[in-house]
Image: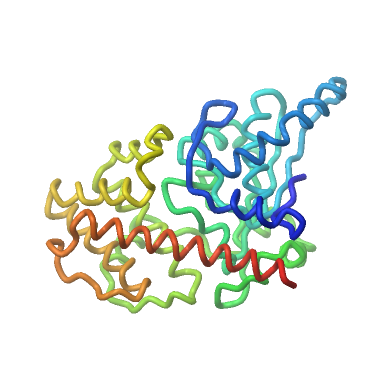
């Protein structure tokens, strides 16, 4: 079991939670640098435990909340090559890039048993960060979304409230409780709509995340692999995304139209003056917008964690 951020280790954990760097895991996959450092610091104790219990058989159940959920995910991917593993996370941020998420899904998921139980409240902002190309596992469904209050709230991140939400339910009933992730057709409709966005509504940030991911894949496709490269540490995540999106303007009118649509949505939710034409969106300006988006979402997650610290 991996705990979340605590008062005792507040400073170190907060840095680990919200550093956006990427490095390779023990199995060579791109993961969040902060979460990976936490896991690596625990590796000697975990290896000692496994070495002292070589006669143990069966399934290893790995559980984590908040930061602990991200660390548990990295631990599960590492251990899945050695033992049968089941992973349970509650309110976890995204632990690694898409390559990591897909490998973890492949290693653990089966047609008869999920083996990955990602639980999150709809109004918990922590599972929304970091933005794509960071992703959750399993990649073949959106997890176990639990309904909660109408607006983003620090209380939605509390483990005690997760315990209340799942109490008395089976995994089958939990899977059908929440509103599931949007499909491609609904994302297209959302991008084309002029409906005002409410930053206090958690669905707004989910749509922003889904829309940004969809547009990156739509306009560039395989070139989005660039986002997965840990070696490009000198280039910020916002700069990578801006570079790829700006290339979309060079591909076709259709691709450029989708880029303009998602950037207009992001500008609206950030309270910025919305661009009317693609010509207003230079790569440098897009970098500024995306930096603000990443900062806004990270700050919301930090605020949530800090609010729980002082209670």
Q: Position of residue 65 (x, y in %)?
A: 70, 53
Q: Position of residue 279 (x, y in %)?
A: 12, 62
Left or right: 26 as drawn, with respect to 250: right
Residue at the spot x=52%, y=31% of the render? 24
Quadrant in which the N terminus is drawn: top right
Q: How is the image coloured?
A: rainbow
> In terms of image quadrants, where is residue 161?
bottom right
The one nearer the camera, 185 or 221, is: 221
Residue at image position (52%, 49%) is 19
Image coordinates for residue 242, horizontal then vertical, percent: 28, 51
The location of residue 235, given as percent across then percent down, is: 35, 43
Q: Residue furthest front?
A: 11
Which residue is nearer to you in this view: 202 or 35? 35
- Quarter that holds the C terminus: bottom right
- Residue at 26%, 46% in the rendered image: 244
- Identified at 44% across, 75% down, the residue is 199
Number of on-image labels: 0
Depth order, front residue of 193/1: 1
Would you identify the image quadrant in which residue 177 lies?
A: bottom right
């Amino acid at each position: 079991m991996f705990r979340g951020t605590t008062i005792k280790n507040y400073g170190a954990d907060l840095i680990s939670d919200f550093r956006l760097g990427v490095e390779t895991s023990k199995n060579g996959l791109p993961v969040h640098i902060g979460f990976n450092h936490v896991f690596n610091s625990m590796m000697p104790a975990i290896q000692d435990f496994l070495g002292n219990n070589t006669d143990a058989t069966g399934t290893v159940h790995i559980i984590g909340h908040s930061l602990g959920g991200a660390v548990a995910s990295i631990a599960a991917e590492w251990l899945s090559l050695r033992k049968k593993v089941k992973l349970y996370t509650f309110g976890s941020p995204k632990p690694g890039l898409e390559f990591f998420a897909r490998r973890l899904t492949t290693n653990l998921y089966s047609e008869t048993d999920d083996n990955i139980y990602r639980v999150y409240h709809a109004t918990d902002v922590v599972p929304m960060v970091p933005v794509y190309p960071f992703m959750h596992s399993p990649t073949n469904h959106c997890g176990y979304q639990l309904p909660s209050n109408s607006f983003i709230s620090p209380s939605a991140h509390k483990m005690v409230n997760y315990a209340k939400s799942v109490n008395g339910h089976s995994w089958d009933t939990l899977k059908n409780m929440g509103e599931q992730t949007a499909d491609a057709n609904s994302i297209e409709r959302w991008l084309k709509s002029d409906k005002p966005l409410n930053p206090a509504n958690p669905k707004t940030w989910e749509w922003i995340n889904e829309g940004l991911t969809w547009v990156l894949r739509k306009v560039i496709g395989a070139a989005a692999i660039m986002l997965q490269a840990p070696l490009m540490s000198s280039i910020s995540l916002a700069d990578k995304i801006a570079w790829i999106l700006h290339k979309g303007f060079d591909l076709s009118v259709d691709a450029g139209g989708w880029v303009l649509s998602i950037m207009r949505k992001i500008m609206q939710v950030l309270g910025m003056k919305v661009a009317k034409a693609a010509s207003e969106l230079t790569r440098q300006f897009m970098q500024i917008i995306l930096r603000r988006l990443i900062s806004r979402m990270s700050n919301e997650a930090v605020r949530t964690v800090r609010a729980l610290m002082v209670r």
